[in-house]
């Protein structure tokens, strides 16, 4: 089962802070959202964990440096489709908005790879 996990950038130093359902102390989901509510974490940067890529790297909503096996020369952004209620990869280089749907219950995606460090852009898909 996919863990319930979120991340957001801290206001004071811009580093990622994480919170998850099973965490304790600094990693607890409750403390994470308390920090968001108190203004210690920028609400605009809060993103949900989606899956692991084929190398075991964590992929979050908004990550914009993802390579898919179908388009190995292009980078995509992970977005949540409110219409389909599924995670999708968005390829911005196409004029007709190409998306590749991912399984909603996905734990590990063997056909995607996060390239370089985790990057993100705010996108409400």
Image: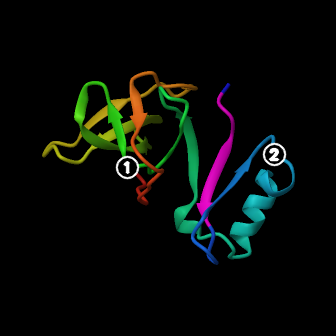
Question: In the drawing, does residue 72 fall left or right of residue 4?
Answer: left
Q: Looking at this rendering, what residue extends furthest in the top direction?
A: 110
Q: Residues within 10 Å of mark 1 (few under 14, many from 20)?
A: many
Q: Looking at this rendering, what residue extends furthest in the front direction?
A: 116
Q: Nearer the viewer, residue 23 or 115?
A: 115
Question: In the drawing, does residue 22 fall left or right of residue 77?
Answer: right
Question: Residue 28: percent from the left, percent from the top?
Answer: 80, 51
* Residue drawn at the location 58% of the way across and 43% of the way down: 49
- Mark 2 lies on residue: 23
Judged by its main secondary structure, the magenta piece is strand
- Mark 1 lies on residue: 64
Quarter holding the N terminus is top right
Q: Earlier in the sequence, mark 2 or mark 1?
A: 2
Read off the magenta span: 2-9
Q: Looking at this rendering, what residue extends furthest in the right direction?
A: 25
Question: Residue 4: percent from the left, percent from the top?
Answer: 68, 40
Question: Residue 123: percent from the left, percent from the top?
Answer: 40, 56
């Amino acid at each position: 089962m996919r863990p319930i996990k979120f991340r957001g950038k801290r206001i004071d130093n811009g580093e990622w802070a994480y919170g998850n359902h099973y965490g304790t102390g600094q990693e607890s989901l409750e403390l994470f959202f308390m920090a968001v509510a108190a203004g210690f974490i920028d609400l605009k940067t809060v993103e949900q964990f989606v899956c692991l890529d084929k190398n075991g790297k964590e992929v979050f909503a908004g990550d914009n440096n993802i390579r898919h096996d179908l388009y190995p020369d292009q980078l995509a952004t992970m977005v949540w489709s409110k219409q389909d209620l599924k995670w999708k990869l968005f390829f911005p280089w196409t004029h007709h908005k190409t998306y590749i749907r991912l399984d909603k219950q996905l734990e590990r995606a063997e056909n995607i790879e996060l390239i370089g460090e985790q990057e993100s852009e705010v996108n409400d898909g």
